[in-house]
Amino acid sequence: MSTKIYNVWLTTKSLRHVMRTLQWMKSEMEQNYRQVLRNYADGGSDPEWFLGLCFHAADSIMVGYRDMNPAASAVVYAHPQQTETPMLLVQTFGVDDSELTKRFVRRIKGADFHYQNQVDQPDDMSNAQWRERGRIWDRLLPGSGNPSENGLSFDMITKRRALELLFSELRLALPPLNRPEQDGKPWEAWGPDCAGMFVAQDYEWARKRNAVPEFKQKIIDSWLRPSGEEQSMHSANL
């Protein structure tokens, strides 16, 4: 069976340091994704057309289209051959930003620890060292070989978080509501990020019940034609 393990680094930094660095990477990825969404929304002069475009983006996120689905995670493993200085292995998934990855590796002082059992070892390793690396991965990923079942998982951006960011940026980008007045609508008082969380949850609820068209109309009525009597979308009955 072919074994291909990429985007993994060996580090002697502490688990606390690694997790803080992953949190930094998560923050950087979210900021980058927000910018993608702002660019996506740029130039939307017709609010209803703009909302339709954003719902297309939401559908793309849920389906998993690559351009709108930034799902990314990491798994941290304890090296099975511990020495006086503890060693960790950090593997990332879905991080396509090569410059961000380089910055991450520098912060953890990581050394490449990839492995593939159907190719020769790298030039800087002996055959014995390469076989030993394979045995290490056999110990780290037994059984199904599922990384998340054998290490400490860390989600950087999930589909839900992508939806939250999308609807948050949508709320900020709508021209009539760029600086919304606090007229009694809870999501305005709490800010766009809270609106993003609530609407993402309701959007998923609507998708499960084949009620997305009704949900879209509710958003249009609430966000483009607010009456002052509207209530929060959170847990709304569509």
Image (cartoon, rainbow, N blue to C red):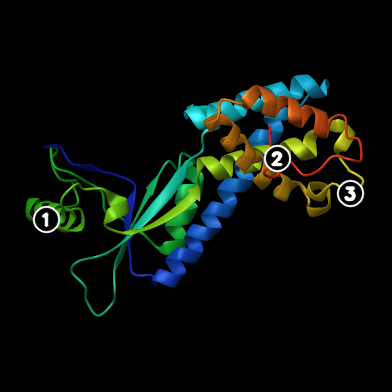
Image quadrant where one finds the N terminus: top left
- Residue under pointer 1: 135
Q: Which of marks 1 and 3 is in front?
A: 3
Horizontal side of residue 20 vs 182, given as left or right: left
- Asked whether 171 or 114 is in front, the reply is 171
Mark 3 lies on a secondary structure that is loop
Q: Which of marks 3 and 2 is in front?
A: 2
Image quadrant where one finds the C terminus: top right
Structural crowding at the residue carrying mark 2, measured as other residues with C-alpha within 10 Å and reported as few (<14), some (14–19) or many (≥20) = few
For the residues labelled 2 and 1, the Cα–Cα distance comes to 54 Å
- Residue under pointer 2: 236
Horizontal side of residue 57 vs 124, given as left or right: right
Q: Residue at x 92, y 40 (%)?
A: 228
Q: Residue at x 26, y 57 (%)?
A: 150
- Identified by mark 2, the residue type is Ala
- Identified by mark 1, the residue type is Arg
Mark found first going from the N terminus, 3 or 2: 3
The outermost residue toward the left is 128
- Residue under pointer 3: 184
For the residues labelled 3 and 2, the Cα–Cα distance comes to 16 Å
Mark 2 lies on a secondary structure that is loop
Q: Could you say which disc has been placed on residue 117 in the image?
A: none
Percent position of residue 125, x then y: 16, 52
Mark 1 lies on a secondary structure that is helix
- Identified by mark 3, the residue type is Gly
Q: Which residue is drawn at 46% across and 64% down?
A: 19
